[in-house]
Image (cartoon, helix red, strand yellow):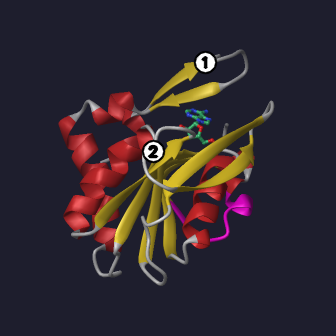
Amino acid sequence: MNLKEYIRNVPDFPKPGIQFKDITTLWKDNKAFKESIDLLYQRYRDKKIDKVVGAESRGFIIASPLAYLLNAGFVPVRKKGKLPYKKINVVYELEYGTDSLEMHEDAIKQGENILVVDDLLATGGTMGAIIELVKKLGGNIIEAAFIVELEPLNGRKKIDAPVFSLVKYQDA
Ligand code: AMP
């Protein structure tokens, strides 16, 4: 199955010049959605993953079915101010300004095997921040997995962990 065929390119969203990779068209197709999760499950099923970490909101959609299949826990990373308990925080750079992500301070135990997932790897800023949170808590990152990777943006360079993606684009 060619998953790329199920991803819709929307030019100039959310602003001129951006080629937005819309994966809602992959998710709404029962076979393509299942295939994307199953491929990741097969890759990590023997890796003794303790927890799958995903950032809101699109990361949740991939992380939760995967955690269920891997018999692992699910850990949400959220935008500032959303999590109720004690948190750790990381500030990361956006194109204009900064943003901040949070994780509960007891979400991960030292030495646990962690799989981090997101829908798309662009510049790597978001995943770099998620990985910083996991490392602060002593998690052992097995890999960072994505549905889509925009290769020309070199996001891998910002990620201090192995990277895997299902669909790659050369024209970001
Ligand atoms: P980055 O931090 O630059 O790697 O951006 C990653 C996040 O921004 C992902 O969670 C994506 O959801 C979103 N994103 C960035 N660029 C695109 C794009 N061209 N198409 C769709 N989503 C994007």
Viewer can see residue 124: no
Q: Secondary structure at mark 1?
A: loop
Give the side of residue 64 with respect to residue 94, left or right: left
Residue 53 found in image quarter: bottom left
Q: Position of residue 6 (x, y in %)?
A: 36, 34
Q: Secondary structure at mark 2?
A: loop
Q: Nearer the viewer, mark 2 or mark 1?
A: 2
Residue 61 found in image quarter: top left
> In this view of the protein, which residue sits in the foreground, 79 or 104?
104
Q: Residues within 10 Å of mark 2 (few under 14, many from 20)?
A: some
Report the residue marked by disc 1: 13
Residue 172 found in image quarter: top right
In magenta segment, residue 158 = yes
In magenta segment, residue 125 = no
Dividing the image into four quarters, tell me where ligand 1 lies: top right
Looking at the rendered structure, which numbered label has been put on residue 83?
Answer: 2
Looking at the rendered structure, which numbered label has been put on residue 158?
Answer: none
Q: Is mark 2 within 8 Å of ligand 1?
A: no
Position of 24 relative to 84 (above/below)? above
Position of 97 relative to 137 (above/below)? above
The kind of residue on which mark 2 rests is Leu
> In this view of the protein, which residue sits in the foreground, 169 or 109?
109
Q: Which residues are magenta?
A: 156-164
Q: Position of residue 38 (x, y in %)?
A: 25, 58
Position of 50 relative to 55 (above/below)? below
Viewer can see residue 47: yes
Give the side of residue 42 with respect to residue 120, left or right: left
The kind of residue on which mark 1 rests is Phe
Q: Position of residue 12 (x, y in %)?
A: 65, 16
